[in-house]
Image (cartoon, rainbow, N blue to C red):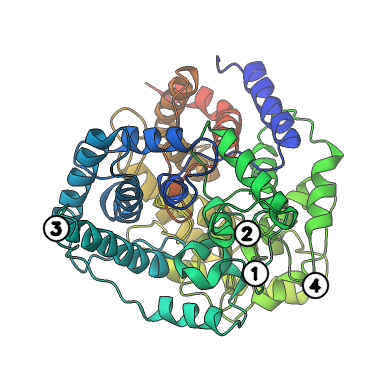
Amino acid sequence: MNTSFAALRDAAQDIVDEMIADPYGLTSPSVYETARMVASAPWLEGHRQRVEFLLAQQHEDGTWGGPAAYGLLPTLSAVDALLSVAGSEDARRVAGAVESGLAALAGRFPRNAELPDTIAVELLVPWLIEQIDQRLSRMDDRGGLPGRLDLRADTGTLNGIRELLRQHTGIPEKTWHSLEALGAPAVRSGTVTPMGGAVGASPAATAAWLGDPPHTDAVKECLEYLRQTQARHGGPVSGITSINYFELAWVVTALSGSGLDVDFPAQIADTLRTALGGNGLSAGPGLPADSDDTSAALHALDLLGKPESVDCLWDYDTGLYFTCFPKERTPSTSTNAHILVALADRRGQGDTRCDEAAERVGGWLVEQQEPDGRWTDKWHASPYYATACGAAALARLDGPRPSAALDDAIRWVLDTQHTDGSWGRWEGTGEETAYALQVLNHRAAQDRPALEAIRAGRAFLSGHVEGGRENPPLWHDKDLYTPVRVIRAEILGTLAATQHLAEAGKQARP
């Protein structure tokens, strides 16, 4: 597509129309999740395609998944899955992939590597190490691959949750999303409830709950969910499925205020309002409510002219910052930035509690800012996402501290632009370039360096769109994923919102 304003508007409307017709939300296929289906559900349609996907996704260095430590969990999952199909008709290719994967696990990941804060990493890594060691031990007994992984991970949390299941005690609802790590006690556990056929909005968790391929009406809905999710990518599966409340809220926010005259059907607001409960809403049906999706939905409803009470946020308030989930391991900067925005939407309405909380969260965000001006976050691999969230939130506040923090964020963005005009943690990407431009857009009108950076960034972004380039996975689930429509909306909205500055940048050039 071209990047004229009319073309941007048409493309944005297409995103909204597609989103309305899709009950799941569009996310990229997951190496981790697809490997779990290979290992636990070979009876499901698309099995051969899932094996082919794993073989095709292996990197030259033997790993799978994202860069650096982000590759550990997907590599463990893929190696375990391919070990489970060793001896298949693709035995030679599978064996080669397994051997290079095992070599990568031995040589590329330190024994006590610091792991990224992805979902349930403290459960999944020790479980998969156990799984692979058991498979290798059985193969060694039969004269196959000898030995065991030279990797160790703390199993305390994993064993504690397993014991809860053995005792038929309810486990935290957020753990349902990673039920596959809990073994035999998870199969048809009465303490876990599928919703819309899905357990924890995860194909892997759903297959783990089903156990052996069942053929009874009691689980017919679960089987249909698995068939539909594997069909979306022709065999491979995504991680979080469904994620539609998240997609609706983020797309509305990305496109509103961009200048694109997008028609948001009433169904969007109706869906979000219906999903809101006493403790907010979740990313999608079958997931526990969280304050991140709740605050984003509240802000989206405000933008749509359908504001709702923010009272559902107060249960997440610690008095210093807001948690995303109860009893979470680490707080989220982007979540608190979204909450600040939702609270700031209520400023001037006489609610002193909202005003006080917004100022307090703003102070906490300032304290979380890195010395160089960026923020980092638990929900995204790139600091450009967290920095865009932090800047958008602090731009809502008055005072010297928020203003200075915003200036620091802008300086960091200006200092980290690549020579081709892009931004990115590992390489320049369309998504991260959009976030960087959003930060600069807060204070660019009279600033020549920022205008020049915006002009170069928009040129890269336009080429990204016109070339139809894909956006690499950067969002945290069990492994990294791309929320496809959300990122498209961020890019289109950013190009539209910065168009006037691009013209100013041309005029500012000598």
Circle 3: element type: loop
Q: Which mark is residue 2?
A: none
At x 58%, y 56%, the residue is 206
Mark 1 highlights which residue? Answer: 192
Q: Position of residue 502 (x, y in %)?
A: 50, 25
Q: Quadrant of residue 11?
A: top right
Mark 3 highlights which residue? Answer: 146
Mark 2 highlights which residue? Answer: 199
Mark 4 highlights which residue? Answer: 351
Q: What amino acid type should be assigned to the residue bearing mark 4?
A: Asp
CA–CA distance between discs 4 and 3?
66 Å
Between circles 4 and 3, the one closer to the viewer is: 3
Which comes sooner in the sequence, label 3 or label 1? 3
With respect to residue 69, does 181 lie above or below? Answer: below
Using the image as rendered, state which of residue 338 and residue 502 is in the foreground.
Answer: 338
Instruction: Judge whether residue 397 can be spotted in this image.
Output: no
Circle 2: element type: loop
